[in-house]
Image (cartoon, rainbow, N blue to C red):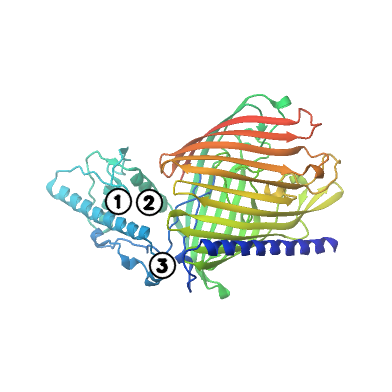
Amino acid sequence: MKMFTRYITDSLKLWVFLAGGGLVCFLAGTVMAENPIPMNITQADITHVSSLQVSDIVRAEMVPAASVSPVSAPSTSVTSVAVTSAAVPSETVSTGGVTPEMMARFERLEAETQRLRQEVARLRTEKSVGKPQSVSVPTMDSGMTAPIPAPATMSGQVGTYASVLASEMVQSSGQESVQPSVQETMTREEVDAYIQKHIADSAWRVGPVKITPYGRIWASMLVSSSRTMPQDAVMYALPSDAYGQTSTAFQARSSRLGLKFDGPDLPFWFFGEMKSSGKVEIDFRNNTGNAENKGSVLLREVYWQLENDTYKILFGQTKDVISPLNTGMLNYYNVWGAGNLGYRSPQLQFTRYYYLTCRTRMEVTTALSQLCGPDFAANDSPGSYPTIQGRVGWTIARDCNRYPIQFGISGHVGEQRYDFGAESDRISTWSANVDLSVPLTERCGIRGEVFHGQGLAGVFGGVNQSIDYRGGLGTRNSIHSTGGWGEFWWDWTDQLHYCVGYGIDNPNDDDMEVTNIRENSVIYTNIVYDFTKFLRTGVEYSYWSTDYRDDMPGGNKGRAHVVEWMWQLEF
């Protein structure tokens, strides 16, 4: 009964904390928003924020959901394709959803349509005259053509993506295919579009459900001045007096495979029509003692969800609600155990979207979940009650920048149980967190998170230490910890990216008698080059500093300089 009372009390404290944070966010959002609060704002009036990051998910260009309606070529002729302002609903215009940038995009799409018409006309002329002509095809954005070798078509000939696309569209209209016989070049944008088209074509259907495979081939080499744990992807440095040997490791276990499911719209009680979707994703970093070339399957995400403009309901395993940002670090472990809180856990999640202006969205998310502590995984058992997670977050779009401002207040309360033989220990786990992402310009920005909490091993806090226990010794108390991370990112070009950051996790020494690690921190910087949207390479330097208790065998300090070189191919 005492544990249940504490659980209820901690839950009330969490929601008071989130309510206070939500009020602060509301006041800040009101000051930063430029427009008055309109009525009947929907999710189509504000941009969805997706993430495009080398390590996982960080940022992406904001795309207004209702800015462009789907446009497809009629079966009669490609020349009837057109993009006009009629594709924009009148209510979107009336609420201020159309910006000068959107109109400029419409104009570029119209110019691309005209270019495709000219290309089809040229192909028809070649067919009738029998004399191919070489035409340089400009891109939609810059009007320039970059000399990138064109991939061979299925017939063995080579041509521009525009030529291939036009030919396929002519074929769909029942006319004979026309293939250019002249050697031409493709721009980077055309290469990306060509690959993206064939990725979309790889999806298949099972009844009303569309299934799309995806994945990431990830290979890297790490050279370290002192041994780390693990050696092919770093979480902390081992004591240098005993493990100061240089090491070189190769790995491909971080590669991942997945399936995306797009289902039909379903009526769901008073929530209205909701889009159904799901995901199954695995990688090969299940650390079960296997060698680097024998990675075991690790279940990353598997869930089913329903979502519309106002609500989202998710059931399965996915990322925790708390501290949702990811770093720009290339290392697989993403500053876990060194300041970045949050993992993936089984949960039932509910989100409510509020649209206060056409540029401001508030998200209130709560979840019932089960945290799984990695410090004594073999002894960890579910608590008596589910862990409650919550977050109040804001997304603010700006005319001066394509990236939005994001900030939020989050936290969790729960219980973890450890069974050491015939003895069982139950400890409290809770956290209070703040996350912030501010683009300074379209080329650079800052982001980061801070946290304070107790019993945080289940969300990779406290340097993965929740309870003070070792070999029957220790206080068996829950360990408090404070930490966070911050970084500066800079896109030199659309293809060249730079990042520098720092993270630290500092457990409370007063809570520990026998627990090994007293502090863990990392400084990192990297540079990444995107050959296309699907192929990239990067080099990262990081300096790891890990402090141990004074009587630790092998020394009380671990220091490691780590250089990592990685390649990623996404599909």
Instruction: Tell me if 529 is positioned left or right of 559 in this view.
Output: left
Q: Residue 187, image x and y in percent? A: 32, 43
The amino acid marked with disc number 2 is Lys
Report how far apart the C-alphas of labels 2 and 3 lie in the structure.
32 Å
Does 218 appear above or below 68?
above
Q: Residue 51, image x and y in percent? A: 50, 51
> Label 1 neighbourhood size at 10 Å, few (<14), some (14-19), many (20+)?
some
Look at the numbered disc 1 and give the secondary structure of its residue. Answer: helix
Tell me the number on the disc at residue 96. Answer: 3
| Quadrant assignment for the N terminus | bottom right
Toward the viewer: 390 or 104? 104
Tell me the number on the disc at residue 197. Answer: 2
Name the mark nearer the viewer: 1 or 3.
3
Q: Residue 529, image x and y in percent? A: 44, 38
The amino acid marked with disc number 3 is Gly
Q: Are marks 1 and 3 in contact (CB under 8 Å)?
A: no
The amino acid marked with disc number 1 is Leu
Q: Which residue lies furthest to the bottom in this view?
A: 270
Q: Which residue is drawn at 54% across and 41% down?
A: 255
Whether residue 196 is visible here, answered yes or no, is yes
Q: Name the residue under label 1.
A: 165
Instruction: Tell me if 267 is positioned left or right of 496 in this view.
Output: right
Q: Are marks 1 and 2 in contact (CB under 8 Å)?
A: yes
Whether residue 291 is visible here, answered yes or no, is no
> Label 3 neighbourhood size at 10 Å, few (<14), some (14-19), many (20+)?
some
Name the mark nearer the viewer: 2 or 3.
3
Look at the numbered disc 2 and give the secondary structure of its residue. Answer: helix
Look at the numbered disc 3 and give the secondary structure of its residue. Answer: loop
